[in-house]
Structures are given as C-alpha cells and as structure tokens.
C-alpha cells in the first residue's frame, strides 16, 4: 500500500447525487475486480454509502476483518475517523488516533508530521452524537484554528482579570 494514501485526506463531502453515481459505478467495478483493486473499491463504496447517510459501521468492521496487515487496518480506520469528523461526530478522534498509531510505522517523516499536525488541530472541534453538516478538511481546520484562538484569548483575558493580591492586606 502506498504510504501517501495513509497521510491523505479521504473524506471530502459529496452531494447525494454524486455519491449515488459513485456507488453505482463502484458496484459495477466490484463485479469484475481483481484482488489488488478490491480494497480501494470497497473504500469508495463505503465512502459513497456514508454520504448517502447510510450506516457503515458494519462495513468498516467487515473491511477491518479482511485486512491482512496493519497498513490496511490503518487506512480503513483513518478513513472512518475522517468521515466521522467531517460531520463532527463523537468517536471520530478515537478512530483518527487509532489509525494514526497503526499508520505511524508505514508513513515517512513528512507524512507523519502532516497527519499528526492535522489531528492536533482537529482536536479543537466540538463533537456531538448528532451529525453536523459535512465539511471539507480546509473548513474543518479553519474552524479548529478559530476555536483555538478564541480559547487562547479567553484564557489570556481571564489571566489578566485575576487579582493576585493577598486577601488579607
């Protein structure tokens, strides 16, 4: 598996029409797929199903069970985490962390730093049990950076407001 696949972002939102077209195309390709193209096609299928608001957790479990090595498990886990965080869902950071841990032995230093920094920034996002409107990675990172700046200003503002005088005198 290409190490660049492990550091890429795979969860770019699709509208329902594009997702349905992708799903139809992939299912046709899967009928004649060779073993080496099966994983990428299954990932495309699962991603399309996600953008069609279908539950993919069982598909993810099945795909993980089919993986023959940790690089495959890393890719599937990272993509699932990316899909979840694109809608700011609880549990997404756990999948991203687990996927990154698995991927760390398979990516080069630049890819490692890219993924680590991206995940560090995404930790700022408020997550929920209810899906938010899907966002692309650029928008997610901008939002995360704004939240971090606001938190930093609030902390700085609170530090300034603290009166450290002795309470007795």
Image (cartoon, rainbow, N blue to C red):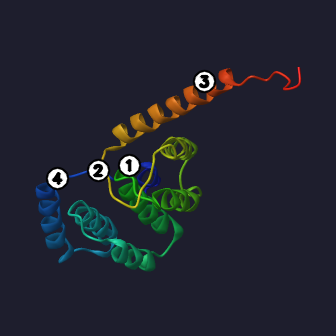
Residue 157 shows which numbered tag?
3
Residue 9 shows which numbered tag?
1
User: Closer to the camera: disc 4 or disc 2?
Assistant: 2
Tag 4 residue: 15
Quote the CA–CA distance across marks 3 and 1: 35 Å
From where the camera sits, is residue 10 visible?
no
Tag 2 residue: 134
- Check contact, mark 2 vs mark 1: CB within 8 A: no
State which quadrant residue 117 falls in.
top right
Quote the CA–CA distance across marks 1 and 4: 18 Å
Count of all numbered marks drawn on residues in the image: 4
Q: Position of residue 62 (x, y in %)?
A: 38, 79
Q: Secondary structure at mark 3?
A: helix
Residue at x 14% of width, y 72% of height: 28
The answer to which of marks 4 and 2 sits earlier in the sequence is 4
Residue at x 45% of width, y 54% of height: 6
Residue 78 shows which numbered tag?
none
User: Closer to the camera: disc 2 or disc 1?
Assistant: 2
Q: Secondary structure at mark 1?
A: loop
Q: Is residue 28 above or below residue 147?
A: below
The answer to which of marks 3 and 1 sits earlier in the sequence is 1
Q: Secondary structure at mark 2?
A: loop
Viewer-proximal residue among 136 and 103? 136
Q: Secondary structure at mark 4?
A: loop
From where the camera sits, is residue 145 visible?
yes
The answer to which of marks 2 and 3 sits earlier in the sequence is 2
Quadrant the C terminus occupies: top right
User: Closer to the camera: disc 3 or disc 4?
Assistant: 3
């Amino acid at each position: 598996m290409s190490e660049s696949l492990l550091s890429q972002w795979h969860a770019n939102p699709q509208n329902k029409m594009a997702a349905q077209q992708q799903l139809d195309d992939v299912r046709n390709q899967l009928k004649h797929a060779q073993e080496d193209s099966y994983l990428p096609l299954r990932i495309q299928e699962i991603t399309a199903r996600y953008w069609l608001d279908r539950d993919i957790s069982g598909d993810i479990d099945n795909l993980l069970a089919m993986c023959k090595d940790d690089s495959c498990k890393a890719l599937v886990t990272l993509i699932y985490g990316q899909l979840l965080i694109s809608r700011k869902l609880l549990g997404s950071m756990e999948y991203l962390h687990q996927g990154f841990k698995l991927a760390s032995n398979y990516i080069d230093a630049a890819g490692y730093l890219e993924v680590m920094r991206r995940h560090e920034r995404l930790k700022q996002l408020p997550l929920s049990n209810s899906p938010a409107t899907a966002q692309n990675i650029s928008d997610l990172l901008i939002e995360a950076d704004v939240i971090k700046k606001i938190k930093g200003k609030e902390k700085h503002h609170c530090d300034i407001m603290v009166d450290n005088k002795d309470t007795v005198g």
